[in-house]
Image (cartoon, grey):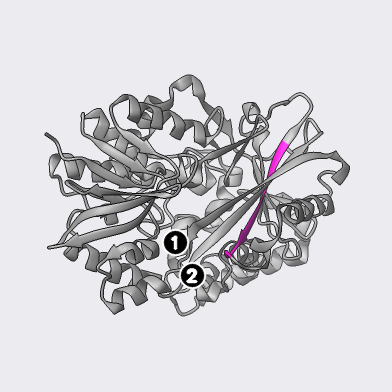
Amino acid sequence: MAKKTLIIGGGPAGLTAAFFLTQQKQPVTVFEAGPRLGGLAQTVNYKGNRFDIGGHRFLTKMKEIFNLWIEIIGRKNFLKVKRLSRIYYQDKFYHYPIKPLEALNNLGLRKALEIFVTYAWVKIFPKRKGNNFHDWMVNRFGITLFNIFFKTYTEKVIGLSTKQLSADWAKQRVKGLSLSQAIISAFIKKPNRIKTLSEEFHYPKCGPGQMWQACGKKIIRNGGEILLFTKVVKIYWQNRLATKLITHHGTANKLWPVKGALLSTMPMSLLVKTLDPLPPRAIRLAAGKLRYRDFITVGLIVSKKQIFPDNWIYIHSPELKVGRIQNYKNWSKAMVKNPKTNTTLGLEYFCNEGDNLWQLSDKQLLNLAANEIAKMGLIHTKQIIDGVVIRAKKAYPVYDLNYQQNVMIIKNWLEFNIKNLILVGRNGMHRYNNQDHSMLAGLQAAKNILYSQHYNLWKIDPDASET
């Protein structure tokens, strides 16, 4: 009889692994601590209105992953959406990708000349290449453009100075993009190989949660087991193997023997704390140094048929606490209960668990969101008819200057000492993966288990066109 695979976490990576394994008639149990599947890519239904935790474009260059999406949800539920996003800065809107004439008009000739002069300067006299986000981006775009369109938003998202942030964040998020390429793309339409500039994407009709709910149903239909509200609180190991784990559900604990592989998508720092016996002090110290950024979505139901045409707007104005605004109706009309009269928005706030923003009550957060969007002139507060607050812990693994060293210390120790433990997913690997990257890691992990293949999950190229 095949050995059961235990999977900690019901996000894209864990569910992809479970889906593939159960297709091959392999026994699987998935433990999900929360009430819904999908991890950060879940959709919350509030009075018939659907709110994403962040916006989740379904965009990939990997045919295997795209075909998997179709297999899970079906073509009729997988919409193709035209992308429109803008940047809000100093009371004005800028299309992203950049439209040079619009930027010139909004910024004025003097500021536009400053952008091109500082860009030309760093191309002739580049800064000494450091390992931080600030230096990497300034070398690519110049100091003026960096300050306008990258610095404020990045510091909102991460909560650190850009000089305290690793250049890896920049390399991963704006890979392949430069000022010249952004300008050229605004004038010359051609097949775009840069994900950041893609003009369309796919999206489930009822939000990303629809994809993962469908995946969960197929896993169960294939014989797998999914347990919600079930938190893994202890993992026992000996003789270089995980041997059993304890889950907590409601008021009860349950012991599970680990006979086969154990896949973990839980945050790396939390995983280290659950191990019994505990790892050496150096491993615990490295885990304690890993940082995360938490996330609040304030969903607003607005009595207005149309508000703005964008899928989302980046808020670069430092006087506003909101970082990004999603317009769910412009992703799919099915996200709104009454699309003929109402629109739903998601105002996203980046914070740290326990800080002032996180500790605000739901009522205070709803008032903050209402006042901020009114200040932007997009709606009047009287048009808001209802709202909901959704909090997400450890939404973003933070790439500080020492994150990579700490991750490698933990990874190398785990691989040597617990051979049947496999790390996958954004928090499991402490990598700011896109959804398709996390899915590929889950898929390759499942193939390693089933076929004894040797995919290196830490060297996945998310920009590969084939898998």
| Closer to the camera in the image, 162 or 55 | 55
Q: Quadrant of the C terminus?
A: top left
Q: CA distance from mark 1 to mark 2?
A: 8 Å
Measured from the top left, where is residue 112 in percent x and y? 71, 63
Find numbered disc 2 in the image and state the secondary structure of the residue it sits on.
helix
Residue 175 painted magenta: no
Say left or right for 20 vs 370.
left
Above or below, 101 relative to 272: above
Q: Earlier in the sequence, mark 1 or mark 2?
A: 2
Task: Report the disc number at residue 171.
Answer: 1
Magenta segment: 344-353
Residue occupying image coordinates x 14% and y 40%: 451
Above or below, 168 relative to 174: below
| Closer to the camera in the image, 183 or 23 | 23
Say left or right for 337 vs 398.
right
The residue type indicated by label 1 comes to Lys
Residue occupying image coordinates x 24% and y 68%: 277
| Closer to the camera in the image, 414 or 441 | 414
Main SS class of the magenta portion in the image: strand
The residue type indicated by label 2 comes to Trp
Residue 348 painted magenta: yes
Residue occupying image coordinates x 55% and y 33%: 207
What residue sits right under mark 2 in the picture?
136
